[in-house]
Amino acid sequence: MRLLPPAWAAALAVATLAPRAAAQDPRLARLDPGARASVVALLDSARTAGLPAEPLMQRALEGATKGAPPERVVAAVRRLAVDLGSARDALGPKASAPELEAGAAALRAGVPPAILTRLHTARRPPLTVPLAVLADLVAGGVPVDSAGAAILTLARTTGDADLVEFRRAVERDIALGAPPAAAAAVRLSSITQGADRGANPSQQPRRP
Amino acid sequence: MFEQQEDVVERIVQYLRRPLQMDPALDGRVMQEIAGLAARRGPAAVAWRWLTRPRHVPVSPLAGLAIAAGVALLVVLPARWLGRPPASAPREFQFVLVAPRAATVSLVGDFNDWDTARTPMRALRADGTVWTVVVPLSPGRYRYAFLVNGAQWLADPAAPAARDDEFGAPSSVVTVGGL
């Protein structure tokens, strides 16, 4: 009898044992019985596809804790699994779990996958914060084109902390009544002009 | 007048060219004096002189490359190897909620399995208006919400809202950079 190569044997063992491991996760006991089997199947599918399963588990737990109906929990988990897969297609197979989760949020907010791919080529990893800021900007009302252009411009030269500060500044301006697109454009302009002068945006005085 | 000067110069030259009678023991005395000077300097001075004296150290091209690679490695060494916390290390985040008339407030989110009992917040003031808790978070994007009095879900007004909320209760988002 010919023995299986070790790598194949390991893969077979993982594929065989993974569903059992998922089924034994004590957190699954918190799910409604009507949703549990479907969620377990989605978790196993994600693992088989090489996608992070933990965000799916957390989404299911969120639904359970908030008392959502089982079908809505399953639908949310399934939608997130699809978004994670799309994010990996756009960001490449080496994207980390946090990057995929942030990418999935950006896609869910309405950002086209092409912008994620351009961001992937424009900036060295990790991309978690640029992707999250992009998702938050679009979710906050900034048009996708404006938000994408701003993040792609800042991604090459701006650090994570300054990206977060950019998002906060845009949100403040929007809360004060500025149109979202204008707020993003003005804040982007102030940062790029500051960079041209050699100033660090995070060191500029903050508005009271 | 010039002949008289030439005569003087000639006599000076002859004087300078005369053979000198040197003491045969002079070399020995000089060397003895030098040895005495070294002995009087003390071991520290001698050691310092030994350390600072230039030397020729033969190094093969391979050894030179190895030394250069070692120096380059030290220069570009990742920060975590030099004692700084790695980028994936958890960072502490403080969550604050102003909730007058609240009896209990919990922080619930992706970082605690949406367990309502795991992260209770404490009242900062005696009147119970400001509630806070500090949570270590690893790099990632987290959804969370506040649960007031065990029944009312509140989003964090100081954080971006999770617009992809699908369960009918508001959530917020916190992003921790690093991965």
Image (cartoon, helix red, strand yellow):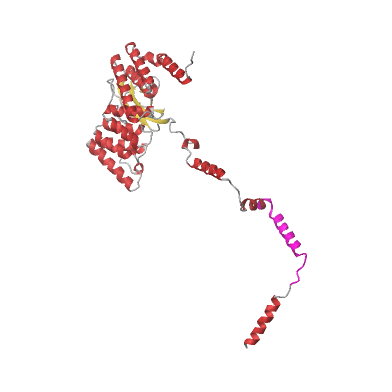
Q: Residue at x 32, y 45 (%)?
A: A194
Question: Magenta span covers which residues?
Answer: B20-45
Q: Nearer the viewer, residue B2 or B168?
A: B2
Decide: is B2 above or below B105: below
Q: Quadrant of residue B8?
A: bottom right
- Tell me if I can see residue B100 in this picture: no
* Residue B49 image position (x, y, % from top left): 64, 53
**Most common secondary structure along the magenta stretch:** helix
Residue depicted at 31% across the width and 43% down the height: A191
Residue A141 in picture, x, y percent from top left: 24, 32
Residue A163: % across, % down: 33, 37
Q: Examine the image and state in which quarter residue A188 appears.
A: top left
Q: Is residue A70 above or below residue A180?
A: above
Q: Is residue A182 visible?
A: yes
x, y percent for residue A124: 38, 36
Q: Judge by depth and name the residue closer to the eye, A126 or B5.
A: B5
Q: Residue furthest bottom?
A: B1
- On whether residue B24 falls in the magenta region, the answer is yes
